[in-house]
Image (spheres, rainbow, N blue to C red):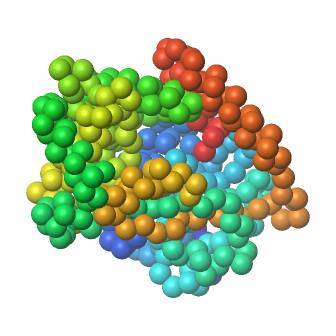
Amino acid sequence: MPIYEINPLTDVRWGELVERHPAGALFHTSGWLEALWRTYGFESSALTTSAPSEVLENGLVFCRVNSRITGRRLVSLPYSDHCEPLTGAPEQLSLLLDDLSARISREDLRYVELRPLNAVERSASRLQLTESHVLHSLDLTTGLSALFRGFHKSSTQRKIRRAERCGLKYSAGQSELLLSQFYRLLLLTRRRHGLPPQPRLWFQNLIACFGDALTIRVASFEGRPVASILTIRHKDTLVYKYGCADHRYFPFGGMHYLLWTAIQEAVGEGVRGMDLGRSEAGHQGLITFKDRWGAARQPLRYYRLPYPGRPTREYNRGSLKRGQYWAGKAISHLPGWILDPLGRLLYRHMA
């Protein structure tokens, strides 16, 4: 069976497939793909067994990442928590993986990376497991009272009530002011963690591409922004993608207040589920935080199709950890005006 390559940003059938396929998610959408292109120059394509004249029955979307530092590769998809192949029968996925395998040699790629939820498991014999994460999701159909009762009493319920008593002020939307408040808090958070921030341009492009589906929420105390989250709605799911806060105000419970407010608004709008995003398998603190919202967790595994016959590069884990430690120490002391261009430079190569 022939395999066809399409441009999901220009082929109207792609949006129709994402909308009707049960696994179609935020990260498949043209909005997400367009933001990746505008910010990082990542060209997107999709493979399908459907001919150009036919209804699109399946598709596996990816971006081409061309970096002189980290090499040429296909990623499905950069900076996406997950990206399920939109297929039906297992044979369709197998055919698409065969085509991807052939492209590795033909295009001289280091590898192809897949970030599925479930579908690739049956074909895992040809794939190398590279990363393990945890994905949390929250069922919003039980109603607000049942949801609140399911929260951890001391770690979640109590902090929500404390935030309400502290008189935090709430703002939401997509304005330039809200973006500036969010980004200042993001810089504080990323510096505290010793990580480069995503460039401000990335968030500007997300706002431009998703419009009213995207919401920046900010909690302020006495006129000072203390916490912020960014969510995007797709179909009947609200995706919590980014969160940041001023650590000096942690006791006020700003993050808990914002998440609970987002949940209440989502339920009021008929949203059925909330995607709380991925957590690294070793990041027990973040996993516990999401557990305490009553969210269900599932394993999230990333795989690679390697270049055939090319030995896998082995890393000295001790040296790698030491390098990450010292890089983090350096980033934690850099001023904000350096961090944004640093993020713009690095994120083109880190996908």
| Residue 223 in view, yes or no | yes
User: Against 157, is 198 above or below?
Assistant: above
Left or right: where does residue 41 sit relative to residue 263? right
Does residue 262 appear in this view? no
Quadrant containing the N terminus in the rendered view: bottom right
Residue at the spot x=68%, y=60% of the render? Answer: 130
Nearest the eye: 165 or 325: 165
Residue 244 image position (x, y, % from top left) = 38, 35
The residue located at (25%, 57%) in the rendering is 153
Q: Residue at x 47, y 81 (%)?
A: 88
Answer with left or right where residue 239 lies relative to residue 83: left
Percent of width and height locating residue 255: 29, 41
Q: How many marks?
A: 0
Q: Quadrant of residue 280?
A: bottom right
Q: Is residue 276 left or right of residue 59?
A: left
Give residue 127's position: percent from left, percent from top.
70, 70
Q: Quadrant of the C terminus?
A: top right
Measured as percent of width and height from the top left, residue 292 is found at 34, 58
Looking at the image, residue 333 lies above or below residue 103: above
Residue plotted at (64% across, 79% down): 123
For residue 116, side relative to residue 95 (left or right) = left
Pick out the residue farthest to the front: 154
Given residues 262 and 17, the one toward you in this image is 262
